[in-house]
Image (cartoon, rainbow, N blue to C red):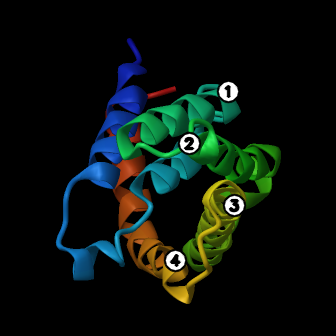
């Protein structure tokens, strides 16, 4: 039976598009970390296919699309994905609620790293609103996990 490995890259492209699609400013404040969640899922499900390198390349694409300094999102995505790849066997056995709490911690880490790097580069001030996307990511994680797992099994992605 043939496997459909291109589905992983299609999901990452969809995550990048969802990450940069224009939204009204009040709603954009709560935009979930689509790309990070998709990378977390694939690095947890197939760590030999999606790991730090894919996260780094996706981060560079985000940097180019956002117009931020090159490497900010690349580094910020690589750290949480490294933690997932290093502990994927443990995280797979967590319940969905525990996985959602891991997504909260990883998403918060991602946003703190992005803030920290942008503070060094531009001197921006911290605002607690930077962490709202972590909350919306936690709320959407169970549905995204279920959807991606269903497609992974249906399309036999290995």
Instruction: Tell me which label, 4 or 3, sits earlier in the chain.
Output: 3
Task: Look at the numbered discs 4 and 2 and tell me whether their residues touch, using CB distance below 8 Å.
Answer: no
Image vertical order of residue 142 relative to residue 77, above or below: below
Residue 119, image quadrant = bottom right
Image vertical order of residue 140 relative to residue 49, above or below: below
Among all residues in the image, which is located at the extreme top?
A: 2
Label 4, label 2: how far apart the Cα atoms are: 18 Å
Q: To which residue does mark 1 refer?
A: 48
Position of residue 37 measured from the top left corner of the image (x, y, whole percent): 49, 56
Identified at 65% across, 51% down, the residue is: 76
Within 10 Å of disc 2 (Cα), the crowding (few <14, some 14-19, many 20+) is: some
- Select label 2 or label 1 by which is in front: 2
Instruction: Tell me which label, 3 or 1, sits earlier in the chain.
Output: 1
Instruction: Tell me which label, 4 or 2, sits earlier in the chain.
Output: 2
Instruction: Tell me which label, 2 or 1, sits earlier in the chain.
Output: 1
In this view, the residue in front, 27 or 97, is 27
Q: Is residue 65 left or right of residue 45?
A: left
The label number, if any, that marks residue 130 in the structure image: 4
Residue 118, image quadrant = bottom right
Task: Look at the numbered discs 4 and 1 and tell me whether their residues touch, using CB distance below 8 Å.
Answer: no
- Select label 3 or label 1 by which is in front: 3
Where disc 2 sits, the SS reads loop
Q: To which residue does mark 3 refer?
A: 113
Instruction: Tell me which label, 3 or 2, sits earlier in the chain.
Output: 2
Image vertical order of residue 92 relative to residue 103, above or below: above
In this view, the residue in front, 56 or 68, is 68
């Amino acid at each position: 039976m043939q496997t459909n490995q291109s589905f992983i890259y299609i999901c990452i492209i969809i995550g990048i598009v969802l990450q940069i699609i224009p939204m009204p400013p009040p709603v954009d404040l709560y935009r979930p970390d689509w790309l990070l969640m998709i990378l977390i899922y694939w690095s947890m499900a197939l760590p030999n296919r999606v790991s730090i390198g894919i996260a780094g390349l996706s981060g560079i694409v985000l940097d180019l699309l956002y117009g931020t300094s090159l490497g900010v999102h690349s580094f910020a995505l690589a750290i949480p994905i490294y933690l997932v790849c290093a502990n994927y066997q443990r995280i797979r056995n967590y319940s969905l609620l525990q996985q959602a709490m891991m997504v909260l911690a990883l998403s918060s880490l991602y946003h703190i790293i992005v803030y920290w790097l942008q503070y060094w580069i531009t001197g921006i001030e911290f605002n607690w609103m930077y962490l709202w996307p972590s909350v919306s990511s936690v709320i959407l994680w169970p549905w995204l996990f279920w959807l991606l797992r269903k497609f992974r099994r249906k399309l036999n992605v290995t």
